[in-house]
Image (tube, coloured by chain):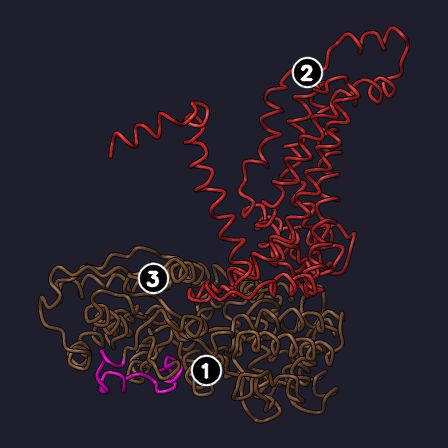
Chain colours: A red, B brown
Amino acid sequence: MREETDMSLKKMPPWLLLILPALVILAAVVLIPLMFSLYSSFTSYRLTRPDTLFNWIGTFNYEKAVKSTVFWAAFGRTILFLTIALNLEMILGLGLALLVSRVTRGQRLLRTIMMFPMMFSPILVGFQFKFIFNDNVGLVNNALQSLGLNNSAIPWLVDEKLALFSIVFAEVWMSTSVFAILILAGLFSIPQDPQEAAKVDGCSPWQSFRHITLPFIMPFIFIAMAIRSLDVARAYDIVQIMTNGGPARRTEILWTLIGRTGYVDAKMGYANAMGYVSIIMAIFFTVYFFKKLNAARNELGMAN
Amino acid sequence: MKKSVIRSMLSATTCLAITAAAPVFAGEFDGVTIDAKLIGGQQYEALYALIADWEADTGATVNIISKKNHFELDREFKSDIAAGTTNWCVGSNHSSFAPQYPTLYTDLTDYMDAGELAGFIPAMIASSTIGGRLVMLPRAQFDVSVLYYQVSLYEDAANQAAYKAEFGVDLAPPDTLEEFKQQAIFFADPPNFYGTQFAGKDEGAAGRFYEMVVANGGTMFNEDFSPAFNSDAGRESLQWFVDLYEAGAVPPGTTSYLWDELGAGFASGTIGINLDWPGWSGYFNDPEASKAAGDVGIIVQPMGSAGVRTGWSGFHGFSVTEDCANKDAAASLVAFLTSEVSQISESAGGSLPTRTAVWDVVVAAAEGDEYRTMALNAFKEGATHAFAVPQTEYWIEATNLIFPELQAAILGDKSVDDALQDASDAVDEMMQENGVY
């Protein structure tokens, strides 16, 4: 028996033998859960009734999700949230990186300080901004009223636009430094020759930024964008704590909707179906940013 | 003084409690280990200190494998059911959550004698019995909302005169929901002071709506659990919230408030009248924590247009899992944790008992403490009007469909009629999808 096993292992090509452990781990932690969740999305699986895992209902959950206005509203809101938050983080991160790159003394300290918001758990950030934007006892309203700038209680977490602003603000506060750090790394890798040549040729600071610095750091920006567009789901905790998708579904995004459906309503089959439909969005953002990344690398002659 | 009274009450009732509880023989469960998943939090911990007594009496050991709040426990229980890891024995339970776990817990009737069960307030045992099975025994953590108010608002001569001039009646704490609304609007002076506030999201919002519907003569569900709240009583109830919001009588953020924000709001001294739970009574009158301290009045909750008082209530309890290897020992532990002795000890911390005899002990212990006596009288009367959530395992799921529609009406996104129609349609679809009817 043992000989047979030894023989079959020996017959395996060495490359397969070498990557086998990785394949086994990948199958265990990624592939099997993925297949399981895909399967369960075709069942009426409820967490509280394990027997429903075998109740095959075909594409019912998918049809329900596709026909649901609540789902598509959350889908649209998530894209809006991603677009605003990522672009703001990129612009602010770029500005921050450019400023920090100019600093000659204490830059290391500044870089460390810049990373502080990243170290907070998103749940803590959620609680912090929930208190700051509370309409009755919150910091912002009290400050505005004490300074005489406003005499009413601004409903930061209730008004549709203000609530979106508040959540984006919290998310931007927490994650801008991710962009700043990655772009700063890009700035450090720019060769000095083209910059010096531009100075000799009499380029203005804007011209040298627009035509030399920016093209060099674009690949870093798109890598940061691609990473953040996948990682931004961490903001689930912030939204869950600050508004939990409310009030009246005004801040409902895919993560809060799917989380509530799966874990509170226990409808895991339907939650998984919504998850698979929303994967379209993740694929779209990833493909888009990688195309942009390749285009930026081509421009620098870095392709292949 | 208070402690010594409680101690003497404890010793006086110990013999009674031990003889009334399911008989325990010394060393009966020698070597048995009971795994337990219990609710954690300061107000719940004192009871767990008594577990050592039960361990000493029976020879068993209790191993607390999880201690979390109920929302986290709920998720853990659901994951356990899904994974089939339900061989732990004793779990904390709550009347609002219990109907969701139809297969998890065993029927305790087989492990308790009738005399033991007779000591509990009958309505609590009825609420703990789901589908004919007694799935939990209540501990001394009973919740029903009563009316808290700032006394000085009602004693203020200018307020009294202005109210009399405007409405033609004397200013007194409200006895009806209509008076409640009228006074909340009268007291409001936004953004510095609000007449009242309400839980505006999750089960909190749907629960408040539920008790208003009942108080106004309606019902949430028909007998087959099809939605019945899209009715005159439902419209009257939702309109009550809408009117308060439109008049600026509540903080504009109230639709995102839950219990902690509401407690902090009343304690900040910026809320006039407040329907809230017993657990807050000590906090509201604590000068260290509350600006309203020394100015808090507590009376029974108001009644709706049908002459019925609001009374959405809930209570904590303990259950034994169906897969427990030693249900006799687990049931003995649950009986101990909910016994008279345990309830007297637990309610000494300020929570409300679920046993008739313990109420008398608690009231006697509060003698001489004017505030505590006022609170207990209000809770005692409030408890007589209490009713639990509808006994369907889909209650929490239904509330998740209802509360966003209530919010939409309150915030003016939808009319009251449209919001109730949409909520009713969504609940109807959900119930049918789950095969309820």
- The residue furthest left is B26
Residue B330 visible somewhere in the drawing: yes
Residue B152, image x and y in percent? 59, 75
Q: Nearer the viewer, mark 1 or mark 2?
A: 2
Please provide the residue range marked out in magenta. Answer: B109-129
The residue carrying mark 2 is: A189
| Chain letter behind tag 1 | B
Residue at disc 2, secondary structure: loop
Q: Quick check: do tags 1 and 2 share a chain?
A: no
A109 relative to B321 in the view: left or right: right
Foreground residue among A125 and A51: A51
Q: Residue B226 bears which disc, if any?
A: none
**What's the amino acid at mark 2?**
Ser
The residue sitting at the right extreme is A202
Residue that extends furthest to the bottom in the rendered view of this protein = B307
Image quadrant where residue B89 sits: bottom left
Which residue is denoted by mark 3 in the rendering? B38
Marks 3, 2: nearer the viewer = 2
Closer to the chain start, of discs 3 and 1, is: 3
Where does residue B215 sit, x and y in percent of width and height?
57, 87
- Chain letter of mark 2 equals A
Question: Would you name the residue on which mark 1 appears?
Answer: B378
Please tell me which residue is depicted at 60% across the width and 67% down the height of the picture: B201
Q: Are marks 3 and 1 on the same chain?
A: yes
Where residue B36 sits: x, y (%)? 29, 61
Mark 1: give few (<14), some (14-19) or many (20+) Cα within 10 Å.
many
Report if residue B111 lies within the magenta region: yes
Instruction: Tell me the subunit letter for badge 3.
Output: B
Q: CA distance from mark 3 to mark 1?
A: 29 Å
Indicate left or right for A133 with B122 as reference.
right
Q: Quadrant of the C terminus of chain A?
A: top right
Is disc 2 on the same chain as disc 3?
Answer: no
